[in-house]
Image (spheres, coloured by chain):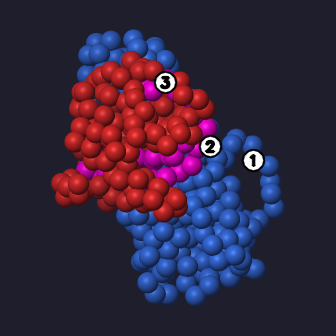
Chain colours: A red, B blue
Amino acid sequence: MIYCSNCGARVIEKVPEGDDRPRHVCEACATIHYQNPKIVAGCIPEWKGRVLLCRRAIEPRYGLWTLPAGFMENGETTEQAAARETWEEAGTRIENIKLYGVFSIPHISQVYMMFRADMQNADHEPGAESLEVRLYEEHRIPWEKLAFPVVRLTLERYYNDLGNNEFPVHVENIMRHPARRR
Amino acid sequence: MIYCSNCGARVIEKVPEGDDRPRHVCEACATIHYQNPKIVAGCIPEWKGRVLLCRRAIEPRYGLWTLPAGFMENGETTEQAAARETWEEAGTRIENIKLYGVFSIPHISQVYMMFRADMQNADHEPGAESLEVRLYEEHRIPWEKLAFPVVRLTLERYYNDLGNNEFPVHVENIMRHPARRR
């Protein structure tokens, strides 16, 4: 941020009075421009024991596999955001949407909210951001070709919980250099 | 948003190519300025069967009672944000922090993430945004003087679950005109 989005003057970085960290501040119009973490909402779409993954058609991690997920929009609920992203990226409608994971990634200021969900039917097709979309059985999951640590973590927790048939909400943090667990 | 924070030119509102909703777009430098929901992190601080509430020293809802909560900052985890806000507003340190509620409020583009937590000791004191801070027993909760619907909802779920001694994670939405339940 270089210019004030309110008046167009140049902003400076300083700690506002009564605050304890630097912000982008406009001294011309006195606006403080706060920046806050973003929510990424997504899901594990389930269909008859299989899970739907998308192969990314965009950077970063072009060509690697991911769960459908993306930035939550203003005016949505978290479940609506997860369902919209699943429709946009994987061309499938979901229902019975249950919170499954809240994963903070502080070094990129993102919070993933991952849900489990049932696909309404077997239909699926790649959206503009996907090269292909495919239903995977557990033993065929492409563990070495997953796009992001949060996708691996979500799927690891999922298959572990599937063994116990209990799905608590996982609240975890992903730090900058996660130890590889698999 | 009137001016581009990147180059200072005036922005326009339009649907970018490949997108499906209007954004603030700078045609001078081609930056798309996305706006996304904010996370409000807070907690129910517990001490020997009582709950710590803060009376607001700021607008909106000056003088009304709330749970400690505030906007999550970049670089934090959700638990860190809840603990920081509790320290800033109520002057108490918490531990054993467990996710309890995820409440979307789409008409103001906020997602509350409320935790249950134990106070480390009985110490508490009002921070700059609080007039006073007080430990409440259930029958003394000032239900008619709570600041926000999300505070009421969180405390209602909490006292209901306390009766069963089971605290599932609640995922709910608060719409523009909530029916009063109490």
Query: Distance of mark 1 from mark 2, alpha carbons?
Result: 23 Å
Find residue A124 and name its label. Answer: 3
Position of residue B86 in the picture relative to residue A117 (left or right): left
Residue B75 lies, with reference to residue B67, above or below; the image says above
Q: Amino acid at mark 3?
A: His
Residue found at x 26% / y 16%: B29
Position of residue A130 in the picture relative to residue B126 (left or right): left
Considering the image in quadrants, where does the N terminus of chain B appear?
Answer: top left
- Judged from the image, the secondary structure of the residue bearing numbered disc 3 is loop
- Judged from the image, the secondary structure of the residue bearing numbered disc 1 is loop
Q: Nearer the viewer, residue A139 or A62?
A: A139
Sequence order check, earlier mark of 2 and 3: 2
Q: Position of residue A129 (x, y in %)?
A: 36, 22
Using the rendered image, report if marks 3 and 1 lie on a common chain: no
Q: Position of residue A116 (x, y in %)?
A: 51, 46
Q: Chain of mark 1?
A: B
Q: Which class describes the residues within 10 Å of circle 1: few (<14), some (14-19), or many (20+)?
A: few
Residue A152 can be seen, yes or no? yes
Q: Main secondary structure of the magenta part?
A: strand
Query: Distance of mark 2 from mark 3, alpha carbons?
Result: 17 Å
Q: Chain of mark 2?
A: A
Q: Which class describes the residues within 10 Å of circle 3: few (<14), some (14-19), or many (20+)?
A: some
Q: Is residue B150 magenta?
A: no
Find disc 2 in the rendering and name its residue: A96
Q: Nearer the viewer, residue B173 or A117?
A: A117
